């Protein structure tokens, strides 16, 4: 697993959050293609919701059980 994917998984261990917050947490730009790929791989799920502070529609991400297992040991073979 790439370092970028491992960082994204680790950022989501705290619970559901939206893409911009994930981007800020890992200090990387353009995390969305990796998040989409990880969703296709079954490591996370996403949904649209309204931001509490902004009132804007945002895409939220949350680890699946498979994602939590990988996040605990991201460099072990699956």
Image (cartoon, grey):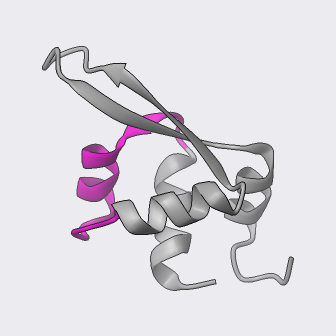
Residue at the spot x=29%, y=31% of the render? Answer: 58
Question: Is residue 36 shown to the viewer in this render?
Answer: yes
Where does the C terminus fall, quadrant-wise?
bottom right
Please name whichever residue, 49 or 10, is drawn nearer the observer in this view of the structure.
Answer: 49
User: For residue 56, which quarter of the picture?
Assistant: top left
Residue 33 screen position, x and y as percent: 40, 67
Q: Is residue 59 magenta-colored?
A: no
In the rendered structure, which segment of residues is drawn in magenta? 14-31
Residue at the spot x=59%, y=62% of the render? Answer: 38
In the picture shown, does residue 55 fall above or below 63? Answer: above
In the picture shown, does residue 13 fall above or below 38? Answer: above
Please name whichever residue, 63 or 42, is drawn nearer the observer in this view of the structure.
Answer: 42
Q: Residue furthest right?
A: 78
Residue at the spot x=25%, y=14% of the render? Answer: 52
User: For residue 9, which quarter of the picture?
Assistant: bottom right
Q: Is residue 17 magenta-colored?
A: yes
């Amino acid at each position: 697993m790439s370092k970028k994917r491992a960082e994204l998984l680790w950022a989501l261990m705290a619970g559901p959050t939206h893409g911009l917050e994930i981007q800020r947490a890992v200090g990387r730009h353009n995390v969305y293609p990796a998040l989409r790929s990880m969703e296709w791989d079954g490591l996370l799920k996403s949904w649209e919701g309204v931001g509490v502070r902004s009132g804007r529609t945002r895409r939220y991400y949350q680890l699946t059980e498979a994602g939590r297992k990988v996040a605990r040991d991201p460099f072990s073979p699956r």
